[in-house]
Amino acid sequence: NKEVDLIVQTPKATFPFEVKYRDHIEIKANDGLVTFCKKEEGALGFMITKRHEDIERKEVPGSRSVIYQVPAYIFCYWLGWLEHRLWT
């Protein structure tokens, strides 16, 4: 069974997140995030990474879905911004 680390569901979309906090990241065709994005056609998936150079957009082969590699510090900023926008 494949898994993702976090799934955020909104009324309009579902966003899967996979955290790979290491120096070298490779998104493989059998990763849980890729499997989820293929199943949820058109999904926006996010791979949270360690290095600030890891800002990248990758198409999911055989799907309309896309996976964005995002450094952890940007992801944390987004979470804080969303919390502020949604709960204050």
Image (spheres, grey):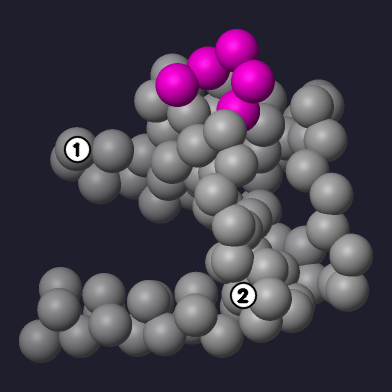
- Range of the magenta residues? 60-64
Residue at 89% x, 65% y: name it.
24
Residue highlighted by disc 2: 71
The crowding category of the residue bearing disc 2, from other C-alpha atoms within 10 Å (few below 14, some 14 to 19, many at least 20), is many
Q: Point out the residue furthest to the left here.
A: 88
- Residue 17 image position (x, y, % from top left): 57, 53
Residue at 55% x, 49% y: name it.
57
Q: Nearer the viewer, residue 29 or 35?
A: 29
Residue at 18% x, 40% y: name it.
11
The crowding category of the residue bearing disc 1, from other C-alpha atoms within 10 Å (few below 14, some 14 to 19, many at least 20), is few
Helix or strand or loop: what does disc 2 sit on? strand
Residue at 70% x, 62% y: name it.
19
Circle number at residue 12: 1
Image quarter where the C terminus lies is: bottom left
Q: Main secondary structure of the magenta part?
A: loop
- Residue 61 image position (x, y, % from top left): 64, 20
Q: CB under 8 Å between callouts 2 and 1?
A: no
- Residue 36 image position (x, y, % from top left): 59, 28
- Residue 14 image position (x, y, % from top left): 37, 39
Disc nearer the start of the sequence (2/1): 1
* In the depicted structure, whether residue 28 falls above or below residue 76: above
Q: Work out how far the residue at label 2 is from the one at label 1, CA to CA, in angstroms.
A: 25 Å
Q: Does residue 39 show up?
A: no
Circle number at residue 87: none
Quadrant in the picture for residue 79: bottom left
The answer to whether 24 appears left or right of 43 in the picture is right
Q: Does residue 70 show up?
A: yes
Number of the front mark, 2 or 1 = 2
* In the depicted structure, whether residue 42 falls above or below residue 19: above
Given the image, on which type of amino acid does mark 1 rest? Lys
